[in-house]
Amino acid sequence: MAIHILIDGYNLLHQMPETAFLMKEDPEEARKALLDRLRTYQKLRRHRITVVFDAWGQDEPRRKVNMKGIQVVFTAPGETADDYLKRMAVKEKERAVVVSSDREIRSYVETYGAVSITSRDFLERLEAALYEELKGEPLAPPPPPSKKLPKKARRRLAKLAKL
């Protein structure tokens, strides 16, 4: 089953030191830097990726742009990225991996079968994938749990292992 990674764009931007700083100076450049990194990650892992940015408070309708294989969504007026992510996760169900540090969103999407991961944890996986590509050697995997986990937990870990 293909994985669809749904990312809260600004949430992830603020976890990356270089883009968090750039957000203060030039938000457009910060978004481009994030998308460049995600594009490289997508080439390595071949997952479908959608990045959602809040456009809440602006007067433009929702915009969807495909940037070299990554779908970028700017939400509609009155709609938050959180609302959009929830709606997409409900639609995608177990195919979705939602990247957000917002506990409420993560809890909500998991009730519908999606898997969630914090922005910080996803960033670590993204960096590990880029390192593997650069050095040609994988980082050491985490040790397996000592007890057998419930089926739902095993499925979640298997999906996250694909990131």
Image: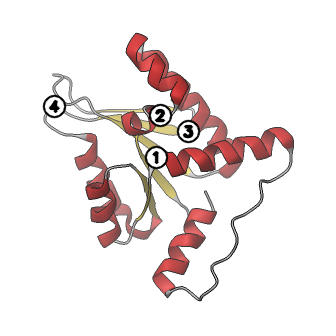
- Residue matched to label 1: 119
Q: Secondary structure at mark 3?
A: loop
Label ID, residue 108:
none
- Residue matched to label 4: 77
Q: Amino acid at mark 2?
A: Asn
Instruction: Confirm whether residue 31 shows in the render.
Output: no
Residue at far right of view: 136
Work out how far the residue at label 1 is from the one at label 4, CA to CA, in angstroms. 25 Å
Q: Residue at x 54, y 23 (%)?
A: 18
- Residue matched to label 3: 69
Residue 162 image offset from top left, x and y in percent: 63, 62
Q: Amino acid at mark 1?
A: Ser
Query: Of marks 2 and 4, which one's residue comes earlier in the chain?
Result: 2
Work out how far the residue at label 1 is from the one at label 3, CA to CA, in angstroms. 21 Å
Circle 4: is it few (<14), some (14-19), or many (20+) Cα within 10 Å?
Answer: some
Camera-near label (1 vs 4) is 1
Residue at far top of view: 25
Marks 3/2 in contact by CB < 8 Å: the verdict is yes
Q: Amino acid at mark 4?
A: Pro
Residue 79 image offset from top left, x and y in percent: 18, 39
Work out how far the residue at label 2 is from the one at label 1, CA to CA, in angstroms. 22 Å
Above-or-below relation of 34 to 158:
above
Circle 1: is it few (<14), some (14-19), or many (20+) Cα within 10 Å?
Answer: many
Marks 4/3 in contact by CB < 8 Å: the verdict is no
Question: In front here: 12 or 140?
Answer: 140
Marks 2/1 in contact by CB < 8 Å: the verdict is no
Query: Of marks 2 and 1, which one's residue comes earlier in the chain?
Result: 2
Q: For the C terminus, give its image quadrant.
A: bottom right
